[in-house]
Image: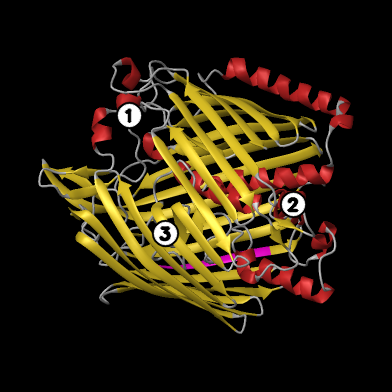
Amino acid sequence: MQIFSNTGGGIFIPAAISFCALLICYTVQAQEHAGSSVQDSVRSAYISYIEEITTELEADDADQLIDYVESLREVPIDINSATRSELGTLPFLNEHEIGRIIATREERGRYDTQSDLYSVDGIGRERVHLLLNFIYIGIPDIVRRRFIPQITLRSHFSSEIHERRGYRENHYLGSPLTTYQRVLIGLTPSIYGGLIIAKSAGERSLTERSSGYISLRFFRKKIHVTVGDYRLHLGQGLLLWSGFGIAKSGNPARGVIRRSAGVRPAASRSEHYRFRGGTVSFNLSSTEAIFFYGHTPRAATVYDDGSVRTLITYPVYRTETDREKRNALTETLFGAHLRQSFFRNITIGLTAYSLRYNREFKPDVLSRFAGERNDHGSIDWIVNYRNIALFGEAATRLPVRDIAIITGVTIPVAQGVDASFVYRSYPSEYISMYGFPFSERRGPADDEHGVYLGVRFRPAPRHLFEGYFDLYSFANDFRSPGLPVNGSDVLLRVEYPVGAATMFDTRARRRSRAIPVVESLDGINERTLADRIQNNVRINFITDPHRSFRLRLQYEKVFVSYSTFGDGETGSYVAADVRWNARSNLRINARYLLFGTESFDSRLYTSEYDMPGRVRTVLLNGQGAVLSFGAQYTPFDNFTISIKYNELFRSDGEFIGSGFQETDGSALGVVLMQIDARF
């Protein structure tokens, strides 16, 4: 397949290459304007982490993850007093790394400077750069500022410049403008709050959706009260966890074990996994107790008999039909979580909640609960011994019925070698609407059984070999065509340095699934099983020839085949990314990508970290190209302006999308602008 033919490459590729060459030449001349190399590395590590991890998530989940990560970055951790549980809230640290940070601190007595962290055995330099975004030694400026009133503002605007069918035919009620305004206010370290007002493309009002909270801490932060919107991160995710639960990714240790972050105030665009009400938390020595209540309106499809069969997970209210589904269901949630630590190495948690609806729930999927009430309870545990962590959670609907369980262990096998093992068993009769445990599928635990083995080997600071094997099955075979019955998932990833400033990163993934398909035999439709095999290979080549310049070349190819059909289908893309710190307060980035797929089944996805707090996921289907160009300028401290232009071009058709989302032409461009400020 020729992905370079008929994609506009004849115009864009020479321009892109020339542009990159000019950037390199000018960078050498602008060396005196580059900022501190350590500061640049710390900032670059944070951006790279967001870019990497969000490629494993859908856009709405990525928004929630970024909100969570930014809230951690806003209030850094004192590395000299941080507990294992506090370090565990940082999603990029595994159990071995947490153990080494604490052990080294105990050996030294304390960390006196940031450079002391580079001496921690088993943590690479890049990981330290990332860690420095979330910790402090002494009293940093960001903590001092929280003792006086401060306001953090984010103002975002974006709009598509190519018209979709919904606008042309007046189906959509509003304009293509997407906007959100977020304000975080900190009166003192114990009194703070947030508010967001947002509108999605096609919606009518600039205040179409809103979210906010007020948080108060009393008695040296032993009592924490949140009123408004919040999310819950409890146990291992079987009962209650926010939407960015990461199942499997390139890092075998990421998401395998979770440490309860408790209540997280929520001011974000995403409405899913968010509750509206209030919480009270008590932290008394080794005991934590959380009581929560929510009375939350949800978007849903209501049928003629007044029942609800479908909850709309990520609602957008573009049409009158969409608006009829808004607040169609009212959900009441109340419950409690108790967590007790023993001997600093054992933590046990108990959780119970009751979920009630004002309408009868009649889901189409057989395994989900039906009715107006859903009660659950669980016990979770984490046992640490010499960097070995035994963890798990067992949950059930109340009164006790079928029990869902996840349990596992992370263990340092040898110097530089970590292994993870997870067993999960989620009965088809069990469902927690707002659970998000480790699993093959996104979302709540639902009719899944599996075993997982992950291994991570770092023989040297810049060398990494890691991978996993996951075998799973689903007992309920009366599902719609396309949902798997059983399967396996294998991934291998290698990071290898090529010189002092260049890194080679490649991953190969093979997913084999038995899925039900409908075949027509002699005019009669029959339901049979077919093996679907998907092989993905992704190659990254990243070079930093200068501290102010980074170039990334990326290639990915997918091959999809079925046991009952003929030849397989392929898709691929090749991309070049440039990031240039032209001056200490100006960063410019550009990307050019060419793609080609033989069908929608061999489609690919790519994610771009457009600007602070925003990730955009692009579906690549057909033949075409993606071009983007952006800049971030900080004219003075605590004030940043970001702008970006993205365009998707398809050369094999006259439109992009389908239905009301179909474009009038083969291009789709988006203009974005954002202001981030702290006063």
What residue is pinned by disc 3?
436
Q: Secondary structure at mark 2?
A: helix
Going from the N terminus, do you reach mark 3 or mark 1 first? Answer: 1
Query: How far from the left and from the top, in percent, is residue 113?
Result: 84, 59
Going from the N terminus, do you reach mark 3 or mark 2 first? Answer: 2
Residue 451 magenta: yes
Question: Which corner quadrant of the image does residue 555 belong to?
Answer: top right
Q: Secondary structure at mark 3?
A: loop
- Per the model, the C-alpha gap separating discs 2 and 1 is 44 Å
Nearer the observer, 415 or 537: 415
What residue is pinned by disc 2?
144
Going from the N terminus, do you reach mark 2 or mark 1 first? Answer: 2
Query: Visible in this render: residue 370?
Result: no
Residue type at the position of mark 1: Arg
Front: mark 3 or 1: 1
Nearer the observer, 286 or 430: 286
Nearer the observer, 326 or 150: 150
Query: How far from the left and from the top, in percent, is residue 223?
Result: 54, 66
Compared with 417, 202 (above or below) is above
Q: What residue span does the magenta drawing correspond to?
A: 449-457
Residue 317 magenta: no
Mark number, residue 318? 1
